[in-house]
Amino acid sequence: MRRIATALLAISLGAAAAAAEPRHGLSVFGDLKYPAGFAHFDYVNPDAPKGGKMALIGPTPVETFDSFNGYILKGDAVQGFELMFDSLMAAADDEPDARYGLVAETADLAADRKSVTFKLRGEARFADGSGLTAEDVCDSFRLLSTEGHERIRITIRDVEACDVISPNEVRYRFKGERTRDLPLTVAALPIFSKAYYAKVDFSKTTLEPPLGSGPYAVKSFKPGEYVTYGRRADYWAKDLPVNKGRHNFDELRFDYFRDRAPAFEALKSGVIDLREEFTSRDWATAYDFPALADGRVIKAELPDDTPSGAQGFFLNMRREKFQDIRVRKALNLAFDFEWTNKNLFFGLYTRTASFFERSPLKAEGAPPADELALLEPYRDSLRPEVFAAVELPPVSDGSGQDRKLLREASRLLDEAGWTADGTMRRNARGETLDIEFLVDGPVFERVLAPYVKNLKLLGINATIRTVDPAQYQQRLEPYDYDVTIGRFMAGLTPGDGLRIFFGSESATKPGTYNLSGVASPAIDALIDKIVEAKTRQELDVAGRALDRVLRAEQFWVPNWYKGSHWLAYWDKFGQPPVKPKYDRGITDTWWYDDAKAKRIANGN
C-alpha cells in the first residue's frame, strides 16, 4: 500500500484530462489502464477469502510510537496509521501514477486547470456510521494546510481553497501557474471527520485511536511492542472496484523491536509471520534454520520495478565545514564501495550514481541539446561539471584504502584550507575538522567503521554517533547533525513533491526531507520545469537536467541499491498470480490460507 508521502510526490495530471468532463480516474498525461466500470485491479484475486491474521514488522525503522496521528510533525507515529483513512481516489499499483475513484465517484477538471470538482459517493461513511460529506473533505484540507506536517503543507501550498458545493460535491481551487500536480495531490489527502476533530485537537499527539473511514480500525496496542488493526466488516467501500480482492486479513499486527537480532528470532519462532531483510550479510548467511529447511518458511525475492531512488550519506551543508565543495569531494573519494560490497555485502549490491537510479530521469554522459536548453539560462550559477560528462562516484581498487583516491582527497582538503597538523587537519582558526555520522541503530556501524578509518587517515576527526530512533528523530527534524543516512524516493512521475527534498523553501523549515539543506534558484527552476512538463518526454528531459545539477554538487556520498525485495515468511498465505508492478502488495493483496496454516500448526 502506498503511503501518503509517496502519493503526494509522484502524482500529477496530464493533458488528456484537461477537458471539463467527469472522469472515473486521473493520471499523468491522461492515460488510464482501467476503463470506466472496471471490475477490479488485475493484480488482485477478487475471490480471495477474508480472515486470519498477519504479524509483521512495519515499513519504518522505529522502535515505539506515541501517537496515532501520522499527519503532524509532533510525535512518533504508529505504523500503519494510513489504514484507518480513505481518500478521494485510490492508487493503482500497476500503473506509474493513475488513481481511481474511492470516496469520489468522479473528478471534473476545469478547462483552465485552475480547479477540480469531485462528486462524492453518497454511501461513504465513517466507522461510527456517520456520513462522509464535502464538509469533511474541506475541513481535512484546512487541518492539513494549517496544522499538518511540513512535508504535506509544502505540496498543497498552491491550493487556494476547498469549496463545499453541495453535501456530495467539493471543489478545490488552485493559484499560480504550476498546478499540474494539484488535482491528484488533493485526491490523495486523507479525509478526517469534521465532527470528531471539532472535539479533538488535531495538532497534538494522542494515543486515542481516531475515528476513520478506512478498511481497518485499531483493535489493540501497546507502545513499544505492537499495534493490531482489525478489518472492519462494515467498511462502506469494501465492494468498490478499487477495493475488490484487497484488505483480506481480519487482523494486521505490526510488531516493534529494538534491533534486528530479536526481530529475526521472532521470525524463526513464528512470533511474526513475515520479515523483509535489509542486511546483505544476514540474507547470505543467516537463513539456515530448521523451519526454512523443511519448507515451512519460504525465502523469496520479489521483483522491485520502482525506481531505486538514492540512498547515501547526506552532508549537512547548513554547517560551514561542508559548504566548500572540495571538502565534499574529498569525503566522496574516501568511501571505498568496491571493498565494502565485496567484504561486507557479499557482492549483492550495485553502486548508486543518480538521484533517479533505475529511472528514465537518470542522466547519462554529456548533456544533449534538449537538456542543454534547460541548463544554459543558469550557466553562470551552475558548476562547470554540469555541462560535461555527468558526475560518477569514484571507483576504487577494492583494497579498502585506495592510495590514489586518498591522495586526491588530501590535496582537495589542503586546497580548502584544512591543512594537516600532525595527525589532525585544522583550518585557519585552528579548528579541527570534526565529522559525526548520526545513525539510529548499530546496523550501519560496520559499514561506517572502515569509512571512518579512511577519514582519520586523512586527518579528519570522524566519529559515529548511534542513538535510539526517538532521539534520532529529535535531531533529524531540526537538522542537528553533520552527516546522516537517508534515502530519496522520487517515484515514477515526480512533481511538486521534489521541493520537499531539494527546494530552497524546504531547506529552512523543520522536518522536511531536504537533509543536506540544498537551496539553489537554478534547482528550484528545474523543479518548476518538471512540474510544468506537459508530456512524459518533457518530464524526463527536465529530470535528467536536474539530476546533473544535483550530482555536480556532491552533497552526498552515494550508497547502493538492489532491484528486489528480500522476504522470508511462514507458508500460510495465498498470493495473486500477478504481483502489483510497483508495490510489494503483501498486506494489500495476500490472504490467509487456512489449509496451509493448519499444516504449519501440525508441524508439517
Image: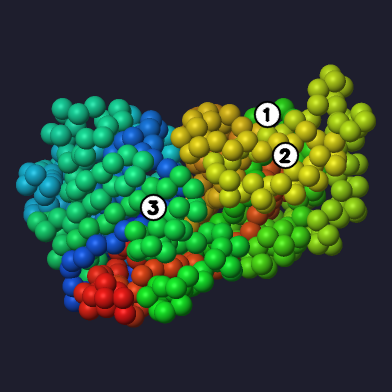
Q: Nearer the viewer, mark 3 or mark 2?
A: 3
Check the picture and name the quadrant holding the N terminus: bottom left
Q: Is residue 594 left or right of residue 532?
A: left
Q: Helix, strand or loop at disc 2? A: helix
Q: CA distance from mark 2 to mark 1?
A: 21 Å
Instruction: Kindly identify the amino acid type of the residue bearing the numbered disc 1.
Output: Arg
Q: Earlier in the sequence, mark 3 or mark 2?
A: 3
Q: Residue 428 in the image: state x and y as whole percent.
A: 87, 22
Residue at (46% x, 35% y) in the render: 470
Q: Earlier in the sequence, mark 1 or mark 3?
A: 3
Q: CA distance from mark 3 to mark 2?
A: 43 Å
Splitting the image into 4 quarters, where does residue 456 fall? top right
Instruction: Kindly identify the amino acid type of the residue bearing the numbered disc 2.
Output: Ser
Q: Which residue is mark 1?
A: 319
Q: Helix, strand or loop at disc 1? A: loop
Instruction: Kindly identify the amino acid type of the residue bearing the numbered disc 3.
Output: Gly
Q: Which mark is residue 152?
A: none
Q: Is residue 24 above or below residue 253?
A: below
Q: Residue 365 in the image: state x and y as whole percent.
A: 74, 63
Q: Which residue is mark 2?
A: 381
Q: Nearer the viewer, mark 2 or mark 1?
A: 1
Check the picture and name the quadrant holding the C terminus: bottom left
Q: Residue 152 in the image: state x and y as whole percent.
A: 39, 40
Q: Is residue 35 left or right of residue 259?
A: left
Q: Helix, strand or loop at disc 3? A: loop
Front residue (pair 555, 158): 555
